Image (tube, rainbow, N blue to C red):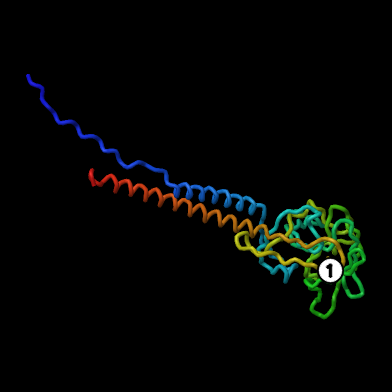
Amino acid sequence: MTETDFPAPPVDRPGPKRRFSPLLLVMILVAIVGVGTGGYGFWTLMGYRMTNFSDGAMAPTVPRGSVVLYRWADLPEIPRGAVVLMDLSAYPGTSAQEGLAIQRVIGVGGDQVVCCSADNLITVNGKPVKEPYAVDDNGYGRKEYRPFDVQVPPGSLYLAGDQRNNSADSRLFADMPGQGAVPLSKVRGIVVGLGSILNAEPFPQTTAFVEAGLPGDPVSDTGFRTSRYLMFAGIGLVVLGVIGAIVTVVRSAGKRRRAAAVPPGH
């Protein structure tokens, strides 16, 4: 019996080597940076809250029906002239069911707030304050401030609406226990923007109290806008990185298929 000669089996031709694409690495890094940037922006943006304001006591600064953006701030960060969101149950004879209101700080702990000067201006620590945002004409050409003279307790704020003749605020309770001062525990936050979180513009701040010679810079908080930009930029980077990575992988796979289809020797 003779040994049958069989042809040698064909040698497997190695396919094209898989190479790691530097572009793929770049796209992955872009996506990772996007996750970090967008996540940080989202996290810091969540430090702000928004609420719908239906009262007209702060018009025209805050028109009726406006959405306002606010954040919490400790007392040293709440200067005179700032606008805060507060719980109306802070006032005597009211309850938690009264809800929330937006009012302006006209005095902080330790201030002597008096109404009114000969020019019909409130005075804080003896300094008359010109308040261009305050509307105090009752429609008959008369100004009807109710006189008061209060010493604001430490850890409290003295508040008033910009519509001075149409606002239930600290001034109405000046002759009651506590004199209408609002403790910080009843303050929900400081208003920093007008509009929702995704489109709010910085809230107009006043320098009236600084111009009167009182210490305390106006609130300057545009952090929500920076956080918003970071969040959107992060989303854009993630989308760019993911799409870029997919395109890179698909192109690399196509090149390997085309290389494998080329006959040996070509």
- Above-or-below relation of 14 to 211: above
Q: Position of residue 168 (x, y in %)?
A: 80, 64
Q: Residue furthest top?
A: 1
Tell me the SS state at disc 1. Answer: helix
Give me the residue at 83% from left, 63% from top.
106
Quarter of the image for residue 163 reads bottom right
In the rendered structure, which amino acid carries the disc numbered 1? Glu
Q: Is residue 48 left or right of residue 120?
A: left
**Place of residue 37 in the rendered image (x, y in percent of width and height, measured from the top left):** 58, 51
Q: Reply above or below: 55 against 154.
A: below
Percent position of residue 235, x then y: 53, 54
Which quadrant of the figure has residue 62? bottom right
The residue sitting at the left extreme is 1
From this viewpoint, is residue 92 visible?
Answer: no
Q: Does 97 sit above or below residue 117?
A: above
The answer to whether residue 16 is visible is: yes
Q: At x 33% / y 49%, what residue is drawn?
A: 255
Identify the residue at image location x=75%, y=66%. 205
Residue, x 23% and y 34% (percent of image)?
11
Q: How many marks?
A: 1
Front residue of 187/249: it is 249
Q: Nearer the viewer, residue 20 or 250?
A: 20
Q: Position of residue 144 (x, y in %)?
A: 86, 73
* Residue positioned most to the front: 265
- Label 1: few (<14), some (14–19) or many (≥20) C-alpha neighbours in 10 Å: few
Name the residue tied to disc 1: 211
Q: Pick the residue in front: 215 or 155.
A: 215
The quadrant of the picture occupied by the N terminus is: top left
